[in-house]
Amino acid sequence: MEEKEINDLSFEDALARLENLVRELESGRIKLDDAVTAYERAVSLKKLCESKLKAAQLKIEKIELSPDGEMKLSELDKIED
């Protein structure tokens, strides 16, 4: 699978492929050259998953009403109980 094909995957598809590659690598039943190629693909899939998670995290916002009645958006992480 080429880098462009990996970048076109959804988060769920990339994660599923990453999990399959990890299982394959952990089994120890693949040849060294194939293991190296699988590892390189796994690294690319991991980076894609991390990137998609980070993008999703940045999109999660909370709407707050300021004391003067204006609405504003703030990061969800900054919610205080």
Image (spheres, rainbow, N blue to C red):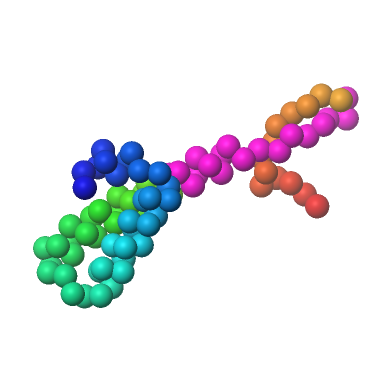
Residue occupying image coordinates x 17% and y 61%: 36
Residue occupying image coordinates x 86% and y 25%: 69
Q: Position of residue 64 (x, y in %)?
A: 78, 34
Q: Is 10 one of the magenta-colored residues?
A: no
Q: Is 54 one of the magenta-colored residues?
A: yes
Q: In this image, 63 relative to 52: left or right?
A: right
Residue 62, picture quadrant: top right
Front residue of 49/13: it is 13
Q: In this image, 21 relative to 10: left or right?
A: left
Is residue 30 depicted above or below 1 in this figure?
below
Q: Position of residue 41 (x, y in %)?
A: 25, 53
Residue 59, picture quadrant: top right
Task: Specify the farthest residue to the bottom.
Answer: 28
Q: In this image, 61 relative to 80: left or right?
A: left
* Count of numbered circles on the image: 0
Residue occupying image coordinates x 56% and y 39%: 58
Region of the chain picked out in magenta, as a range: 51-68
Residue 40, picture quadrant: bottom left
Q: Position of residue 57 (x, y in %)?
A: 56, 44
Residue occupying image coordinates x 13% and y 68%: 32
Q: Position of residue 11 (x, y in %)?
A: 42, 47
Is residue 28 depicted above or below 47 in this figure?
below
Q: In this image, 48 relative to 59: left or right?
A: left
